[in-house]
Image (cartoon, rainbow, N blue to C red):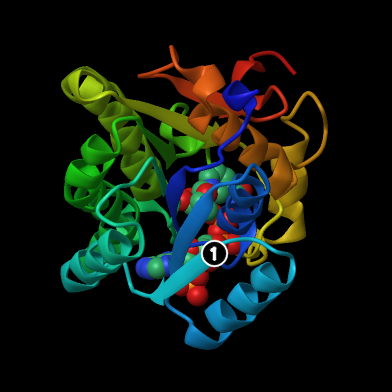
Amino acid sequence: GTRWSLRRHTALVTGGTRGIGNAVVVELATMGAAVHTCSRNEVELGKCLKEWMESGFQVTGSVADLSKREDREKLIQQVSIVFDGKLNILINNVGTFISKPTVDYSSEDVSFVMSTNFDSAFHISQLAHPLLKASGKGSIVFISSIAGIQAIKFPGSIYSASKGAMNQLAKSFCCEWAKDNIRVNSVAPGFTKTSLVEQINEEIVTGIVNRVPMRRAAEPEEISSLVTFLCLPSASYITGQVICVDGGMSVNGFF
Ligand code: NDP
């Protein structure tokens, strides 16, 4: 039935060329959605678009650096043209981190992390609101992190703060935009095997994984399945929630 399908739905996934964003693009497209995505790297984006087209998916893309206001504005203009002014699904996935002790962060570090993670998600949501409203049935999902819920030693205070702020946006937007038939949720992944975490040394990875009751990291597909579910008509009464996908890490207080 149509409750478990995204046919005739349109979606924007920010940062879809690698990791969690890539898995979300594939899964939304598999469920029948037409998807637009973006990244900063034109060559990698072109490669992905070619592969998706060969798989029979309906995916388009733009080169954009979402840490920049002008690029966000241009992206939403392009999305509006591609989808005729209507958007059902917005996945705010783009994110970065700089791991440092708090006293070592420069003001450039702070604004780079905040503009990439928080400002981009806030501003893209603002810009996409008219399109989401016009679709008659909208769903926004923030990709935050369990680091936005719990204090963890790694990857650093400014990253955690940016993610905590995204979780709060899910709650505020839920209340503000329910009247426009837009649901808003936040997915908080635990440690997930992507290019973002390749820089982390093995000792730290072992330390993190040992805190996870399931004793392993997540695959990107284990995150994208919840993200996709939250966009389905089946999830029509779920809004304002922050949901962890973390192998139990966030409830492990004892071992
Ligand atoms: P990756 O670095 O593997 O992928 C990030 C994607 O976003 C790439 O496609 C990248 O392409 C794109 N991107 C990054 N910065 C920008 C930018 N400024 N403008 C446009 N595109 C951009 O990261 P993950 O898949 O691991 O992370 C995705 C989200 O999940 C992030 O918000 C992250 O904080 C969150 N998360 C990840 C966890 C993990 O353990 N991996 C855990 C918890 C949360 P390009 O670089 O070419 O622009």
The extreme bottom residue here reads 43
Residue at 56% from the left image edge and 41% from the top image edge? 7
Q: Amino acid at mark 1?
A: Val
For the question of whether residue 216 can be seen, the reply is: yes
Number of disc labels: 1
> Quadrant where the N terminus lies?
top right
Q: Nearer the viewer, residue 178 or 114?
A: 178
The extreme right residue here reads 215
Residue 172 higher or lower than 210, as above or below: above
Residue at 65% from the left image edge and 47% from the top image edge? 27
Element under disc 1: strand
For the question of whether residue 154 can be seen, the reply is: no
Q: Residues within 10 Å of mark 1 (few under 14, many from 20)?
A: many
Q: Is residue 127 left or right of residue 210?
A: left
Q: Position of residue 253 (x, y in %)?
A: 64, 14
Q: Position of residue 121 (x, y in %)?
A: 30, 49
Asked where in the image residue 141 lies, by quadrant, the reply is top left
Residue at 29% from the left image edge and 68% from the top image edge? 78
Q: Is residue 104 left or right of residue 131?
A: right
> Quadrant where the C terminus lies?
top right
Q: Is residue 70 left or right of residue 50?
A: left
Asked where in the image residue 184 lies, by quadrant, the reply is top left
Q: Position of residue 126 (x, y in %)?
A: 17, 46
Residue labelled 1 has its Cβ within 8 Å of some atom of ligand 1: no
Residue beneath disc 1? 59
Q: Position of residue 124 (x, y in %)?
A: 25, 52
Q: Nearer the viewer, residue 137 or 101?
A: 137
Residue 80 higher or lower than 234, as above or below: below
